[in-house]
Image (cartoon, rainbow, N blue to C red):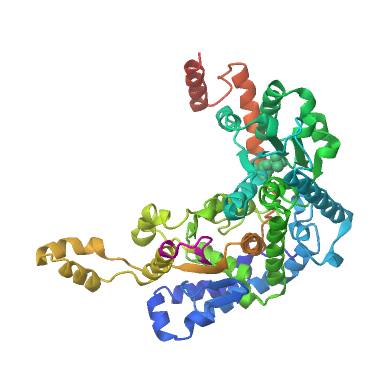
Amino acid sequence: MKNINPTTTAAWQSLKDHYRSNKNFNLKEAFAKDPNRAQSLTIQDGDFYVDLSKNLITKETQEKLVSLANECKLEEAINSYFNGKKINATEDRAVLHTALRTRDTTTLVGGNVVAAIESKEKMFAFVDAVNSGEKKAANGQKFDTIVNIGIGGSDLGPVMIYEAMQAYKNEMTLHFVSNVEGDHVEEVIKKINPETTLFVIVSKSFGTQETLTNSTTIRNWFTKKVNAAAVSKHFVAVSSNVQKAVDFGIDQENIFPMFDWVGGRFSLWSTVGMSVALGIGTKNFQGLLDGAYEMDMHFKNSSFEKNIPVQLALLTIWYNNFHNAQSEAVIPYTQYLHRLPAYLQQAIMESNGKSVDRDGNRVNYETGNVVWGEPGTNSQHAFFQLIHQGTKLIPAHFIAFAKAKYNQPDHHNKLMANFFAQTEALMNGKSIEEAKDDLLKAGKSESEIEKLVPFKVFEGNKPTTTLLIDELTPQSLGKLIAMYEHKIFTEGIIWNIYSYDQWGVELGKVLADAILNDIQNSISDAHDASTTQLLQKFYSLNK
Ligand code: F6P
């Protein structure tokens, strides 16, 4: 992989000039000028219809952005990524979550990848045995509840998928324990029957404080409620550190390995997906993998002009680095995807929240876009005011599924009407004349109209990308997630940063351990004045 500072490329300079000379670009005018605009800026790939035309770009902008990708050697980087080159250089690892879903096993690289496929097969056999009732709880009953214990990538992906796949779930009930607060554990254990619950401890490192604390508390509770001998039947682990899982007391045969070349936040395709597979069955889990593979092939084989993840990444760079946008929103128009923004926050911000380039120098440009969101239409009644009339530029992804899961046409039509209306309104805005006209029609007097009109004007020209997908299925969900994974990769390549390490989070873990020691010994004076004061307040409230 070549390390290229993107700002030194000819395309970057050309994009800067292009941005300056198009400062007054207006979406409404662009559509009026070019009858072909909607069609020429839309990409269709199977069940994905991605309309980029309501963005602040022209075909010329798109061409310049593609030149930037070319100058930053994106194609070469994509080959290194799929071929298992150690592109996660600071951890000396390959990045091969794509190998977990490949159907083309001839391209698999290295013995570990084969071992990972075997580990997935072992997981599928286990999941089928639990779901069929062949593998039973210690008392001989069928398991009916799963508790996933993990955090970060060992939690967010599985929760997001499980919530999204409610229409595909079987009779198994799933709970997720992630946070280290005892209250989270207590709220879960009060809902479950230990006799029929399977606990899945998910930790790539098997060294994460939250997961080990929660697992220990739950195992102690379980031992009291059932007995110690039943632990081997009720606790399984997913980890790349098999020895640590054994030391924790998990039976070797109940450990489902994962490998260091799968990053935590990209691991839901591996054995980390165990709880999800238990909740939706292996057939649906395979559907997720197949959908992701479809997107992998699209990303690998499409020209950059018609490549969905590449185009989405280039738009992020356009807004982040040229328009100085501070964040972007992801608005799924389905409650099923209510955890998608949280999942993407880890995937995107843990990956690209970096300020040092691949040569170890501080970057002299912006990286790491901030992402946030909530399902529509809830979000319309929450933060849309700021997007419509606030001072910030917030490019947004609008995601909807053409077919609903249940036959409720009245609901679905209203949902979709909102979906289409919002992107149209964000683009068109409302002029002074239109606002005046509305007020006149509402029976307002001349003086009232003069007073109110400034507040009723919408600037418009707010950029959005519309993703219209046929239906929410395991396949389309897998494809959607893989789309964001490759978007993250593309941005990281162009920003010349390492997207697959997370040293910033590692630091937080060490610092918390140091303060924990002080709390356990009621020490407060080893810190700055503010922290000392806070610790003293905390001790006094807990006396
Ligand atoms: O948040 C930091 C992190 O290292 C994530 O990358 C990872 O998903 C999470 O902690 C959990 O780590 P583990 O699976 O090793 O417990």
Q: Is residue 490 above or below residue 90?
A: below
Could you tell me which residue is drawn at 62 percent across and 60 percent down?
A: 477
**Does residue 501 appear to the left or right of 165 in the view shown?**
right
**Does residue 194 appear to the left or right of 26 in the view shown?**
right
- In the picture, the quarter occupied by the N terminus is bottom right
Chain part drawn in magenta: 398-411
**Does residue 393 appear to the left or right of 66 in the view shown?**
left
Would residue 22 be visible to someone looking at this image?
Answer: yes
- Does the segment drawn in magenta span residue 410? yes
Which residue is more in the foreground, 362 or 407?
A: 407
Q: Position of residue 329 (x, y in %)?
A: 48, 58
Query: Quarter-wise, where is residue 195 in the image?
Result: top right
Q: Is residue 131 above or below residue 469?
A: above
Would residue 355 be visible to someone looking at this image?
Answer: no
Q: Position of residue 305 (x, y in %)?
A: 61, 77
Give the mark count.
0
**Does residue 236 appear to the left or right of 167 in the view shown?**
right
Q: Position of residue 246 (x, y in %)?
A: 83, 33
Could you tell me which residue is drawn at 36 percent across and 61 percent down?
A: 388
* Quarter of the rendered image showing ligand 1: top right
Which residue is more in the foreground, 423 or 353?
A: 423
Q: Position of residue 36 (x, y in %)?
A: 48, 85
- Does the segment drawn in magenta span residue 242? no
Q: Is residue 239 above or below residue 541?
A: below
Which residue is more in the foreground, 532 or 429?
A: 429
Could you tell me which residue is drawn at 70 percent across and 38 percent down?
A: 143
Could you tell me which residue is drawn at 10 percent across and 65 percent down?
A: 445
Which residue is more in the foreground, 425 or 73?
A: 425
Q: As drawn, which residue projects farthest toward the right?
A: 111
